[in-house]
Amino acid sequence: MGDGSSRSPVVSVHTGDALGRYGFGGDHPFGADRLHAFWDEMYRRHLDFQVRILEPVQANIEDLLKFHDRAYVDRVKQYSDAGEGMLDYGDTPAYPGVFEAASAVVGSVLDATHRIMRGDVRRAFVPIAGLHHGQPGTAAGFCVFNDCGVVLRILRESYGLERVAYVDIDAHHGDGVFYPFEDDPAIVIADIHEDGRYNFPNTGFEHETGKGKAIGTKLNVPLLPGSKDAEFRKAWERVEAFLEGWKPQFIVFQCGADGLVGDPLAHLLFSNQCHHLAATRLCRLAERHAKGRILATGGGGYDLRNVGKAWTAVIDAFLHAPM
């Protein structure tokens, strides 16, 4: 596929130093080496030449303010310039340039979204993205700016879509997306995660299905620690039936790799076949209802081998699911 000129539609992947700089130093579990782990596996599987590679894009302040409070955005900039301080209660430290790195995450996801909406690409993947714990007024869980939250607002407000699906299979509940959109009936959310009684952020319970006019537009599927592929497949059938009922016009897919066996920050025992299954089925659903439009973000994952396996499984599905 190369540069995308010889075949359309294409699968795009944003990558580059600006994205690679999003990561925390020392022994922090979210290191800056996750992007390299992904590309090492892309090369090994000979997938690199089959995608359209795109450069990172910086978000502007107006983009960030679609989801985040002005005071918080200003604070991130201040701490970034100073190169120190905590952006939350202990998980997300500032470092020199974190504002620019986090803005590149948001900007690259927005660029992928605009390209999909224009028809330049059909399926897109941004590996360093899916920062689904970020709140409007604070960082949380290694997430500075919530790229998914920004994109959902853009799809609603700038493109006027009436039904947008957010699907999250990260081991940790996507609380930074779920609760800000809990009362929005246009944002359909399906989230498979480790039961919040046993893991961060201790949210995402099955009885939470939305509020007000949005009751019934949200689906949480918490799984017990030790759940394997069989449990994931059962959960996925629920998710797919739920999404089918809403016929989304665009799908945002957060495909965190921390549900795979061996991740140090979760207790699920999935294989990368779960990611391939979810991505393939979502592509089919997107073809039926969303003109093929699907955007995947890498999310979490703290075992580098798993990061490569899970994310390339998504790429493989994006390349081979019927268009």
Image (cartoon, helix red, strand yellow):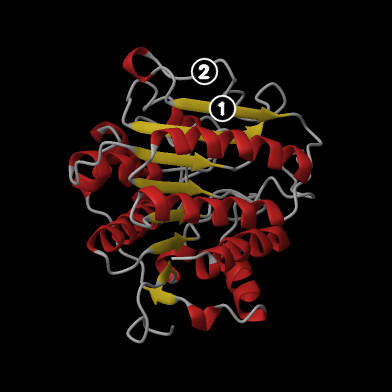
Query: Of helix, strand and loop, which one carries label 2?
Result: loop
> Residue under circle 2?
208
Question: Which image quarter: residue 210?
Answer: top left
Which corner quadrant holds the C terminus?
bottom left
Q: Residues within 10 Å of mark 2 (few under 14, many from 20)?
A: some
Which residue is drawn at the image coordinates 59% and 42% (left, top)? 169
Residue 89 lies left or right of residue 202; in this view the side is left
- Do the residues bearing badges 1 and 2 touch, measured as CB atoms within 8 Å? yes
Give x and y (percent) for residue 281.
55, 52
Give amino acid for label 2: Glu
Q: Amino acid at mark 1?
A: Asn
Residue at 41% x, 62% y is 123
Residue drawn at x 47%, y 45% is: 131
Q: Residue at x 32, y 25 (%)?
A: 184
User: Height in image: 70 above or below 63?
Assistant: above
Q: Is residue 190 visible?
A: yes
Whole-angstrom CA distance, mark 1 to mark 2, is 7 Å
The label shown at residue 301 is: none
Residue 13, relative to residue 154: is it above or below? below
Crowd around label 1: few <14 · some 14–19 · many ≥20 (10 Å): many
> Which mark sits nearer the N-terminus, 1 or 2?
2
Q: Is residue 310 left or right of residue 63?
A: right
In the rendered image, residue 55, in percent from the top left (x then y), is placed at 36, 72
- The residue at which mark 1 appears reads as 220
Image quadrant in which you'd find residue 171:
top right
- Residue closest to the eye, 16 or 7: 7
